[in-house]
Image: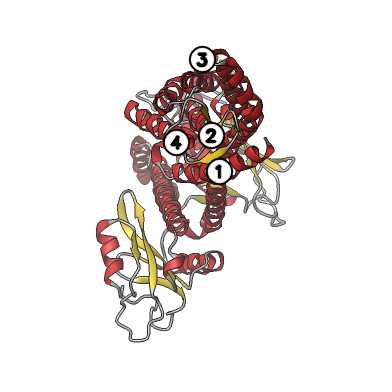
Amino acid sequence: MWQLCLSMVERLGIIVMVAFLLTRLPYFRRLIYHQEVDGMQRFIIMVIFGIFGIVGTYTGLTVRVETFEIMKWPWSLKENEALANSRVIGVVIAGLLGGWKVGLGAGLIAGIHRLFLGGFTAVACGISTMAAGAIAGIVHHRKKRANALSPRVALMVGMAAESLQMLVILLVAKPFASAWLLVEEIGIPMIIANGLGSAIFILVIRNVFQEEEKAGALQAEKAMRLAEATVHHLRNGLTPQSARAICELFIREVPSVAVAVTDRTHILAHVGAGSDHHLADEPIQTEMTRRVIETGEMMIVRDRVICGHRHCPLHKAIIAPLKRKDETIGTLKFYFHSEAELSSIAVEFVKGLSSLLSLQLEIAEAEKYYQLMKEAKIKALHAQVHPHFLFNALNTIVSCIRIDPNRARQLLVSLAYYFRKNLADATEMLSTLEEEIRHVQAYLTIEEARFQDKLRVRYEIEAGYEQMTLPTMTLQPLVENAVRHGLKHMKKGSEIVISVKAEGSMVKISVSDNGKGMTEEQLSQLLKAPIASQSGAGIGLYNVYERLKSLLGEEAELSLASEKGKGTTVQLLVPYTERKVGYAVAYSGYGRR
């Protein structure tokens, strides 16, 4: 019995070979990875495993019941002969992989073949083979696929299927005495051998895929690590400096003799062998690189790299395109010494790297356009100066020319400074508190002339914050809003207070008026969007709020407080980004400054 067991285990090498060959089939791989396969592919798998069962039959051992003489390679059986074989392995694996339909189909193919082979156990073996496929398929559906493909489950199902075959032989095969003698002699060896064979089959295919997945995971991890390391180099796009940094990084991490990066026409960087004549800023030297740029497809150069230099040491290469929005803007090239280094793993790795770099280039381009859009938006906000302010200022100056020429001259100087500041702010994103205060003073000089001394302005500014950074045109729109909307209908006693003081690590800036105030509904809408009205109410506040968010981030805050008939206070809380300069701007008191 044990000799028979060893003889059957020796034949498990065929199982290992078949398992490995099956891993090369794409639809078989999809079954292992739990992906969908169509009906024709399932039929092909069913036929393959049915043939596998037939091979298991022919590689079995013929056993004569009376003498228990063992013979190899049975082509037909006499009435007193039976088989010790591994037929059930192919059928069990078919059911575990493809479900009961595939298992039953493979069982029908192998079982019908066994019926025609003859012997007193032909019917019993044929029936049990079909049943084994159905049982394995039921296990496939009862368990999750991943669990059904474990070696442990395969061992148990293989042993159970062979045990079922022994039981069917005892129930169906005649005469019973011969059936009993046969089962007694071959039962345990076949149960052990077929259980082990099923487990080994699953173990082989799982190990093959796990090794491939492990290798792929390592390459993916390396590619992600390299991509992460190149992010900051590509923030400004594909330049000679960024290309050089990438090449130096890649040649340390990838087993290659040289790495190069080009744009569409010139070599941006070349590191490694051949760097004596593949020089940066020179035109592209190889026809293959130009072809990759034209087609946008990766190319594997297996012949000698032809660059025009007699002693060029570069022999093999992988040239991958670098793309931005489906446009090829350059190439990434890895050079190798031998054909063996051009493995499928190396090709996929380079392909993945080029895709990641292309994505980074697209992100860098998008970031560039985002910054341009952001600056354009801020400049558009700066440009929203109310044109009727100019008309009112000119009318005020005209009225002063005859009665008070000196006052008119002062107003013209203030108006010139006001608009000069506006023009400067169209190109500058940031200014200082001192500049903002001067801008406010220029504006209020004109407005105070219009109000004919009915407007009082008070400055409460702590010393040392003159050089702190603020977005340009931060204070003037707040003051303008107070004058035009808060104090517009007041005949006397109009007052504006501008305050700057420390609050922890932040600086609190507020502009208050004692005007007509606002309702809670008006207050809640001011910072959500520009309020469309003939007078333009709310536009200044919204602009300031947008600039604060754009230039200082979420740390900056703008808040409003107002009460109907009692005035409005606009308060900014901004980070203090400059050191105190140690001197005070002594703004205090009332009236024009």
Viewer-side residue, 285 vs 591? 285
| Image spot of residue 535 (x, y percent) | 38, 26
**SS for tag 4?**
helix
**SS for tag 1?**
loop
Marks 3 and 2, how far apart in space? Answer: 85 Å
Marks 4 and 3, how far apart in space? Answer: 81 Å
The amino acid type, in three-letter code, at marker 3 is Glu
Provide the residue designation for mark 3. Answer: 521
Viewer-side residue, 352 vs 373? 352
Q: First in sequence, mark 2 or 1: give its number.
A: 1
The mark closer to the camera, 3 or 1, is 1
Name the image quarter holding residue 186. Answer: top right
Q: State the quadrant of the N terminus.
A: top right
Outermost front residue:
66
In the rendered structure, find residue 11 and report the number of the disc placed on it.
1
Viewer-side residue, 46 vs 38? 46
The mark closer to the camera, 4 or 1, is 1
Q: Are marks 2 and 1 in contact (CB under 8 Å)?
A: yes
The amino acid type, in three-letter code, at marker 4 is Phe
**SS for tag 2?**
loop
In the rendered structure, find residue 86 and report the number of the disc placed on it.
2
**SS for tag 3?**
helix
